[in-house]
Image (cartoon, helix red, strand yellow):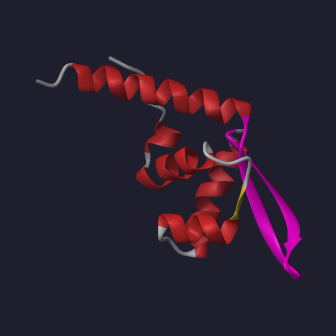
Amino acid sequence: MPDLDPLIHAPARLQLVTTLTAVAEAEFSTLREALQVSDSVLSKHVSALVSAGYVRSRKGTHEGRRTTWVGLTDVGRRALHEHVAALRELIDVVD
């Protein structure tokens, strides 16, 4: 049985980390809109992924307002690749 990563497997977290593969980092509000979730939901997902070392976040200023930037770490990128490989393994047994 392939090893799915339970931390990444939740749909919003999977979408979050896959979105981050395309950029060095993304603004919190951009991620919130892309995932169509509330600030509090996104904040919980980001916190869980930061705790695991999968993403990093930093506070900054953009166009005169404070914002949070989120980026995928090397650990997170590897975890995502392993998770995707496990998903592919599962999919390969489906007719």
* Residue sitting at x 28%, y 24%: 90
Q: Position of residue 55 (x, y in %)?
A: 70, 45
Q: Is residue 10 left or right of residue 31?
A: left
Q: Quick one: 43 or 84, which is closer to the camera?
A: 84
Q: Is residue 61 left or right of residue 68?
A: right
Q: Quick one: 27 or 55, which is closer to the camera?
A: 27
Specify the farthest residue to the bottom: 64
Q: In this rendering, is residue 92 above or below 20?
A: above
Inspect the magenta stretch and tell me whether residue 48 lies in it. Answer: no
When asked about the image quadrant of residue 43, the answer is bottom right
Inspect the magenta stretch and tell me whether residue 65 lies in it. Answer: yes
Dominant secondary structure of the residues highlighted in magenta in the image:
strand
Q: Quadrant of the N terminus?
A: top left
* Residue sitting at x 62%, y 27%: 78
Q: In this rendering, is residue 39 above or below 18?
A: below
Q: How many marks?
A: 0
* Residue sitting at x 85%, y 64%: 59
Q: Position of residue 32 (x, y in %)?
A: 57, 69
Q: In this rendering, is residue 65 above or below 92?
A: below
When asked about the image quadrant of residue 67, the answer is bottom right
When asked about the image quadrant of residue 30, the answer is bottom right
Q: Position of residue 35 (x, y in %)?
A: 49, 64
Q: Which residues are magenta?
A: 54-73
* Residue sitting at x 37%, y 19%: 2
Q: Quadrant of the C terminus?
A: top left
Q: Position of residue 47 (x, y in %)?
A: 68, 55
